[in-house]
Image (cartoon, rainbow, N blue to C red):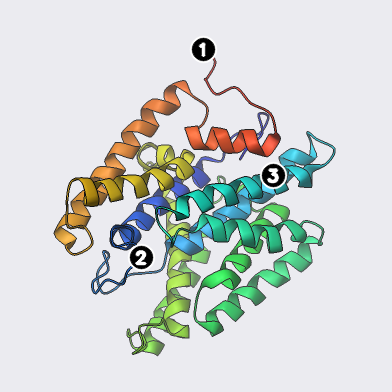
Amino acid sequence: MTSPGRPRIAALDVLRGFTLCEILLANIQLIANGDSAVMTQPMGDWDPWLGLPIFSLLFGIGFSLLLDSAANRVPRPRLVLLRRLLALLAIGLVHSLLWRAEILTSYAIVGLLVLLPSTWLPRWAVAGLAPALVAAALIGGGGGPLMIAGLFLLGSALVRYGMIEKVERSTRGPLLLGLAFAAGAASALWAQGGARTGTGTPSFTSSLADLLLAGVYVCTLLVLLRTPLRPALAAVFAPLGRMALTNYLTATLLVLAAGHLLGLPIGESLTAAYPVAAAILAAQWLFATLWLRRYRQGPVEWLWRWATWARRSALRTPTS
């Protein structure tokens, strides 16, 4: 979601790629079973709720970065954002024919109802609404449209206050914030005794702990990206993150193909789910790495960009 004059923020690509891996692990059995309940989660009994918070935050960040880019390029930047959300809604509706629990439709609707209107608000109002919506979501059960809206606005506020521009240059900030998140998560887990409610619905404290754990993972990755591990992390996760939409959609196709065409018992057996997830991620990483050597964006990202700007951009990377 960057303009030609804006360099990509590598840390965001790494975060997207990392989160994409967690989302597949958490969802693979649900996809295989058509969203039917499973007794054992792919991540085990302790399954932190990471994918939704991190991806929602990143979506809000990307949305505001695009607004900044559009404001410098076209006279009506919000029309660009409107087209982007409508295109995402169309993609999500098609994807829902394969997996009814997909998240893109919800992202588009919440974006249209909350994120786009928030662009007319001052940044202090956006920053104030974000924690209020997150708190309301936690009190109401831990997720849903309120949580998505709150994290969208949080990501937008981070951009509008200039925090994202500093994300590649800071170590102390993510380190201190991560320690605070870790302390909060440990306190929340201690308070709720490590148990979910008897109905299977996450309690306030367990949902809060999962949200804080997502913050710990984000801060940990940001700190690690300031160490000699940065090249390895970028090599593993950035290709997946740069083609996150393509990979999210193709993962559904590949899981369904493995379950229905190959007959693998993904929905019933962890010994089948884990290897399939690993194989899908490895194939996606290889494809993304090779694709991005020749092209600027993933194929679905390129189509989404075309719909966003209402004109076709160059796909192939120019050769010297």
Please, what is the three-letter code of the amino acid marked with disc 3? Answer: Arg
Residue placed farthest to the left in the image? 271
Tell me the amino acid under the disc marked 1.
Thr
Front residue of this view, candidates 221 and 68: 68
The image shows residue 287 at horizontal and vertical percentages of 35, 32
Q: Which mark is residue 319?
A: 1
Which of the two discs, 2 and 1, labels the residue nearer the N terminus? Answer: 2
**Residue of label 2:** 35
* Mark 2 and mark 1 residues within 8 Å of each other at the beta carbon: no
Cα–Cα gap, marks 2 and 1: 45 Å
Up/down of 242 relative to 148, above or below: above
Measured as percent of width and height from the top left, residue 144 is found at: 53, 71
In the picture, measured across the screen, residue 132 lies left or right of residue 284, that is right
Tell us which disc is closer to us: 2 or 1: 2
- Eyeballing the image, is 15 above or below 142? above
Question: Where's residue 77, x and y in %?
Answer: 78, 43
Going from the N terminus, do you reach mark 2 or mark 3 first?
2
Residue located beneath label 3 in the image: 83
